[in-house]
Image (cartoon, helix red, strand yellow):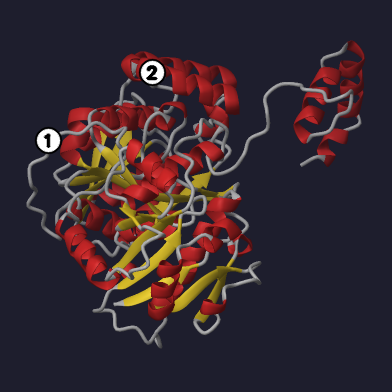
Amino acid sequence: MEVWYVESANSEDKNMMPETLVEWLDSHVTKVFCHSSETDIGDWLKSKSIYRFSEDQVPVNIQLGEGFARSFSLSNLIIKLLGEKNTDLVRSDPIVLFIHQDEVLPYFILQHIWTLNKQLHNVFVVTLHNKTLLNQIEYRFPQYWHKQMEKQCISYSHANIAWDKVILDTLNQNGYKEVIYFNPINSVIFDWEARLMEIIKEKQAHSSRFPVSSSIPLRTISSMDNNECELLTVIIPFYNLGCLLTETIESVLKSTYSTIEIIIVNDGSNDSESLKVLNDLRNFNSVVKVIDIENQGLANARNIGAQAATGKYIAFLDADDMIHPSYYTRCIQILNYYVNISFVYSWVKFFGLKDDVWVTFNTEFPYLLMSNMLSAFAVIRREDFLKYGLNKLEMDRGMEDYESWISMCENGCAGVSIPEELVFYRIRSESMSRKFNRKIVNELYSKISSFHNESYEKYGKELFNLNYANGPGYLWNNPTISYPGIGYVSEEGEITSANNLKYELIRMANSKKGRLIIKWLIKLKVNKWFK
């Protein structure tokens, strides 16, 4: 067994560890990971191999708050180190990573482990707790999400250690009864190597169930006989996008998962180019099948495709989007491994008119009731979708997939995010989502809340506080960052923040003089300067 240690960026965490724990780590640790700003490392660490991580190492198109950015950078560093060809590791032996909770530092490495990243095979995490957010009432982002992900980190860690009795009691009171208490007064060095091996073996024996959020209802699931080559049906709803469909089909055919059928649901296309492309595909090969229906909208087309599918798993793919070659393989590997996971997805890389990344998380309530947590690319157990997730035809202006995820999660169908960019969403000026306006969004959320009245009532208090603290849910797409306050709040007559400046400009624009000035500026085409 090899032991690695992640130094906390918080001086309180590293300075308050019990001496006996430090002594044990000193005699076992071979590699140490420190934040790049850390200069005052303990003497016992200086003889180890030291690696540095920093939030500044996150690509510019991935927006993460500071705590999550550090976690992302750390996980990338560890995965890269494990993947190097000249590594001195004997991968048949386990690696145990001791890491401080330190906001959400363990989050991404744990998410990668549980989503079966091959570089992290036989890697186990022991999380050290010197503080906790679980006893705090906090609804502002990112603090609220730090608290939610602390819960996830505790559940995902292979072992949790606390040496402060108050912290231990708080974790126990929140339902985490298996936290190991390291008595700082006891000078006897515990046989941690033997204990850790026991914990690892116990965790391995129960690894067929993913530790989903407690907000997702439990349901009875019989054991599943999974074949590595189960058929996947890729469903492509199609309407007059002949110029892009071929590129989408090609991306599916390049998939490393080869047991695939493709169903194109032609939703009444009528332009000549699209009809020609469809005719060519009808005779393309036995993998591709075209179903022609009258135009009734996206929700109906998806349902028709799911009902016609013969695969154990289904995946929806819009006719202008694409997937990474490994995406379907990775998703089905997770579905085959965990009996209690119903759908798997990844981060979304936008292309076309945008070039950023949508960071996604595992589904949980109540956040899912306020903001969509995933795109329509998910790979889904067909049986679960037909039973709980069929798109509602009333969602005829969009968000039909979002409503479907809520329905599935209400019925115990959990979703898991692979924290990598494995799907590619094309942003076009004609896209349905680009035509959303406030009226449409309000109408769709009103329908969703009516369909799921019980859930909105159940989480009403928490939803109210989230809304009050961060503004309406349609403004959120990333809980790891902070959002400006809603409304005009002047401090001693000064416009001191970007948010206050925005509302002052709105006030000016709504005045009589302001409207005249704006009309004059538009005539002069001054608005063209601000792209």
Establish if 494 lies above or below 182.
above
Which residue sits at x=18%, y=64%?
Answer: 201
**Horizontal and vertical percent position of residue 11:** 60, 60
| Towards the viewer: 236 or 196 | 196
Q: Which residue is mark 2?
A: 456
Whole-number angstrom distance, CA of label 2 to CA of label 1: 24 Å
Q: Which amino acid, mark 1?
A: Thr
Q: Quadrant of the N terminus?
A: bottom left
Q: Position of residue 46 (x, y in %)?
A: 55, 81
Report helix, strand or loop for mark 2: helix
From the image, tell me which residue sits under label 1.
220
- The mark tally for this picture is 2
Of residue 325 and residue 359, the one placed in the foreground of this image is: 359
Residue at left offset 41%, top offset 55%: 163
Estimate how packed mark 2 is, as few (under 14), some (14 to 19) or many (20 or more) residues with alpha carbons within 10 Å: some
Point out which mark residue 132 bears: none
Q: Nearer the viewer, residue 13 or 217?
A: 13
First in sequence: mark 2 vs mark 1: 1
The residue at 86%/17% (across/down) is 515
Q: Relative to residue 29, is residue 132 depicted above or below?
A: above
Quarter of the image with the C terminus is: top right
- Lateral position of residue 154 relative to residue 205, left or right: right
Q: Quick check: 388 left or right of 528?
A: left
Q: Taking the image as drawn, is residue 318 in sight?
A: no
In the image, residue 25 lies at what x, y percent?
A: 41, 73
What's under tag 2, amino acid-wise?
Tyr
Q: Nearer the viewer, residue 115 or 398?
A: 115
Q: Secondary structure at mark 1?
A: loop
**In this orientation, does residue 231 appear?**
yes
Give coordinates of residue 8: x percent, y percent. 53, 62
Residue 112 position by quadrant: bottom left
Mark 1 neighbour density, 10 Å: few (under 14) some (14–19) many (20 or more): few
